[in-house]
Image (cartoon, rainbow, N blue to C red):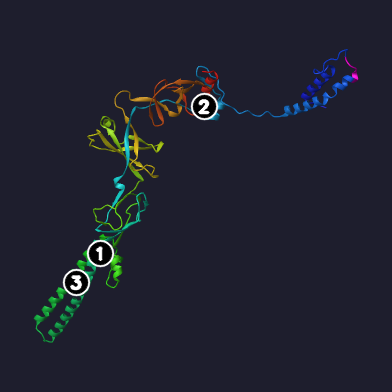
């Protein structure tokens, strides 16, 4: 029968113990005891040894657990060694420095304002008395939503004029029919030589005058209807003003409901029910805030470096980690005599309405620098790590070795950082994974008590 090597070792140990005195039993004085006594002392130990052997055999048969691979580093003079396997696991990536156009960062203050082309100022079209206002400041409204109602005094007068013209038209039409009947009778009598031709001419003239009166009345009615159209009435509403309808209907016709001309947010409300207002009184203002203006104060000393199309980055305190980007669309030609600054305008899309009117903002403008060095060295910002308060990068020396390099940095240009000292153009810099290298370096320094 084949035995496990461990069992063979255990049996060998047991055999050796059978020939020597157990270490925990002192040799009795007077020599060894009889064999039967010796076996009696040793026999109780055998089961314990066998059990221990079986447990050890079970332990030996286990598969060793796979240990978690950690990025073990070997450092020396700022160097870190990381195996290729660990690099792949942590997704290490490298990049080289690049030369970009030298720019100058200008910081300025700004404020968020509405686009005047997206603001609707609502006022009554004629003098009247406010009856009800349907909205408040801050409400969102859609185009066509009711805003306020008022009793339009001028509309009431126009409705009265229209009804009077309709009544006069009826009179003119009756007179025209009467004139035409007289003319027909005169012509019949002339054929029978009962009257002179002169009478017929008179009747013809009277008929033509009656026709002209009817045409004139139609023109007057058309003029009044145009006025009603300007007040927002439709043909159906005007036709409903005929004399056959009840007076209550005509009374309600002068009540005007003003609707929203655009979709947006109510940013202003004036007036209250019962107040008499006119066209000069602005009742409401609606602003479409899907796009807003950022008005920047550009000081006189910086104007030469700022032009239309200059890219800008806008930040507000409410969203410190979320910049809003745009370009200069307009620069004023007039300076404020007190601040010696000119207003510049940036149009910013605001679909989620995060930017609120009146917010203060900080603006960073990237202006091209004329003269001096045309380009600068820049690297990805993810390659920069601060160690002991100093900006540093990790240079890849070979497949598994990296070295820390102190650098001096300049301006931040979007996702790139200008480096003024410490780099060569042909070096590979660690981007993804640089924080892991920093952690390993600091861990070793802490272990060494540095």
Q: Are marks 3 and 2 in contact (CB under 8 Å)?
A: no
Left or right of 84: which side holds 221? left
The residue wearing badge 2 is: 436
The residue wearing badge 1 is: 156
- At 52% from the left and 25% from the top, the residue drawn is 439
- Please tell me whether residue 350 is drawn above or below residue 402 in the rendered image: below
Crowding at dot 2, Cα within 10 Å, few <14 / some 14-19 / many 20+, comes out as some
Question: Residue 432, image x and y in percent?
Answer: 49, 29
Magenta extent: 32-36
- Please tell me whether residue 47 is drawn above or below residue 145 in the rendered image: above
Question: Residue 447, image x and y in percent?
Answer: 55, 20
For residue 214, which numbered disc appears in the image?
A: 3
SS of the residue under disc 3: helix
SS of the residue under disc 1: helix
Q: If you read the primary sequence from the N terminus, does the residue marked by circle 3 or circle 2 appear first?
A: 3
Dividing the picture into quadrants, the one containing residue 418 is: top left
SS of the residue under disc 2: helix
Task: Quote the CA–CA distance across marks 3 and 1.
Answer: 25 Å
Is 357 or 431 nearer to us in this picture?
A: 357
**Dot in front, 3 or 2:** 2
- At 27% from the left and 54% from the top, the residue drawn is 123
- Please tell me whether residue 222 is drawn above or below residue 417 in the rendered image: below
Is 393 or 115 nearer to us in this picture?
A: 115
Query: Is residue 399 in view from this perspective?
Result: no
- At 51% from the left and 27% from the top, the residue drawn is 436
Query: Is residue 446 in view from this perspective?
Result: yes
Left or right of 46: which side holds 309? left
| Outermost residue to the top | 30
Crowding at dot 1, Cα within 10 Å, few <14 / some 14-19 / many 20+, comes out as many
Task: Quote the CA–CA distance across marks 3 and 2.
Answer: 97 Å
């Amino acid at each position: 029968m084949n035995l496990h090597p461990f069992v063979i070792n255990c049996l060998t140990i047991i055999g050796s113990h059978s020939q020597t005195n157990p270490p925990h039993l002192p040799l009795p004085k007077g020599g060894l005891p009889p064999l039967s006594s010796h076996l009696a002392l040793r026999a109780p130990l055998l089961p314990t040894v066998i059990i221990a052997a079986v447990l050890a055999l079970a332990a030996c048969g286990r598969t060793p657990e796979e240990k978690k691979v950690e990025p073990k580093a070997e450092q020396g003079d700022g160097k870190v060694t990381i195996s290729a396997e660990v690099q792949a696991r942590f997704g290490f990536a490298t990049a080289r420095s690049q030369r970009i156009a030298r720019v100058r960062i200008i910081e300025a203050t700004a404020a968020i304002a509405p686009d005047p082309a997206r603001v609707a100022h609502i006022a009554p079209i004629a003098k009247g008395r406010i009856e009800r206002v349907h909205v408040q400041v801050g409400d969102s409204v859609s185009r066509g939503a009711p805003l306020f109602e008022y009793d339009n005094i001028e509309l009431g007068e126009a409705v009265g004029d229209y009804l009077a013209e309709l009544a006069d038209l009826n009179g003119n039409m009756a007179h025209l029919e009467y004139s035409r009947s007289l003319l027909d009778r005169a012509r019949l009598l002339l054929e029978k030589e009962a009257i002179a031709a002169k009478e017929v001419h008179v009747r013809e003239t009277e008929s033509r005058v009656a026709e002209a009166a009817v045409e004139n009345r139609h023109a007057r009615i058309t003029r009044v209807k145009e006025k009603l159209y300007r007040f927002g009435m439709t043909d159906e509403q005007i036709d409903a003003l005929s004399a056959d309808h009840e007076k209550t209907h005509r009374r309600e016709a002068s009540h005007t409901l003003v609707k929203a001309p655009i979709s947006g947010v109510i940013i202003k409300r004036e007036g209250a029910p019962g107040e008499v207002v006119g066209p000069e009184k602005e009742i409401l203002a609606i602003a479409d805030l899907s796009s807003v203006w950022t008005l920047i104060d550009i000081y006189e000393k910086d104007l030469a470096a700022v032009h239309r199309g200059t890219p800008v980055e806008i930040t507000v305190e409410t969203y410190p980690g979320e910049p809003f980007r745009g370009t200069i669309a307009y620069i004023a030609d007039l300076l404020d005599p007190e601040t010696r600054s000119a207003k510049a305008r940036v149009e910013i899309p605001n679909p989620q309405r995060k930017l609120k009117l009146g917010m203060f903002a900080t603006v960073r403008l990237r202006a091209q620098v004329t003269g001096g060095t045309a380009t600068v060295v820049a690297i990805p910002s993810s390659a920069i790590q601060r160690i002991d308060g100093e900006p540093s990068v990790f240079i890849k020396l070979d497949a598994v070795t990296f070295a820390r390099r102190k650098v001096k940095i300049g301006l931040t240009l979007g996702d790139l950082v200008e480096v003024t000292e410490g780099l060569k153009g042909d070096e590979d810099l660690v981007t993804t994974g640089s924080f892991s290298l920093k952690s390993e370096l600091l861990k070793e320094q802490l272990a060494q008590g540095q």
